[in-house]
Image (spheres, rainbow, N blue to C red):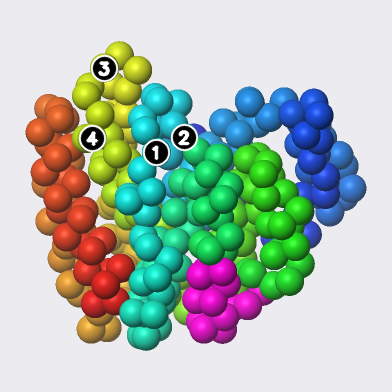
Amino acid sequence: MKTFYFVIISSIFIVSCSNNNNQAIVETADTTTTEVDSTNKFIAFTNEMTISNIPFPFELLDKIYSSKVTFSQNAMNATGNISKYNQFDSKALNLGIYGADLAYAVTYEKFQLIGNYVKNTKKLAEELDIPIAFNQNMLDKYETYKSNKDSLAMIVYDSYSKVDEALKGNERAGMASLVVLGSWLEGLFITTKTFIDEPKNDSNKLVYTEIANQSKHLNTLITMLEEYKTEKNYTPIINELVEMKKYFSTEKFDESLVIELHKKISKLRNSIIEGF
């Protein structure tokens, strides 16, 4: 998978979408306008959506979408859980989780679900003192392009790039790492949960490879978080991630292993969405 450090600054934004010819128009700060066929565009730019050297989960989720794995709203963190998040670390982790849920809804074009998840991400971002990520201008874009998959994907990514940039700019890189962990973990949770509910077939067998490929991102996350292991909430998370590594250290990555990996992911994920 092609991965490189890529942060979209606030000058990049969506200016127009054509619903008639299924094309998206994107304008950058130098006012260059590019039209790209939306079918290829979604695949192209989701391959490059990387925050803090960890891919935002669009590409992984697009793999299960392309494999015709059925959408499951039960795989998403319920929006009502937001009342449980009182600590800053919990808010950061679930800001990442809700971001992956947004990516999931966009990928499967479940546009009717997006509004409540945007509200939750806005609330958590404001409580973390990073309102720029979901200011009125950004909310207007969500409303304007609420039924355009390509544009929404870019807007979601732009929002989370601003989260990452703002936290690091305020010397809160540890919290930025938690946001990234949340989005990565939720993307992998959704993938493994929805995938194991489907029988293995020729259409979805390549998803095994994509799940196995997450090992390198797991290692990166552990390295990032170990810089903050003296803080009380980081150590148990790091320990869970280190234990998770054993599921990737095998050449035989089959259905039974995916099921076991999902159980391990669920343990950490469930503690996070309950507000630990």
Q: Quadrant of residue 177?
A: bottom left
Q: Is residue 189 left or right of residue 22?
A: left
Q: Nearer the viewer, residue 192 or 49?
A: 192
Q: Residues within 10 Å of mark 3 (few under 14, many from 20)?
A: few
What mark, if any, has residue 197 been given in the picture? Answer: 4
Q: Indicate yes or no whether the magenta region holds residue 130.
A: yes
Say what secondary structure mark 2 lies in: helix
Q: In the orientation shown, which residue stands out farthest toward the right?
A: 31
Q: Please provide percent x and percent y for residue 127.
A: 52, 83
Q: Earlier in the sequence, mark 2 or mark 1?
A: 2
What mark, if any, has residue 62 been given in the picture? Answer: 2
Instruction: For residue 222, say whether it is visible.
Output: yes
| Front of the two marks 3 and 4 | 4
Q: Which residues are magenta?
A: 119-132
Q: Find disc 3 in the rendering and name its residue.
A: 201
Q: CA distance from mark 3 to mark 4?
A: 12 Å
Q: Please provide percent x and percent y for residue 129.
A: 56, 83
Q: Quadrant of residue 60?
A: top left
Q: Is residue 264 above or below residue 42?
A: below
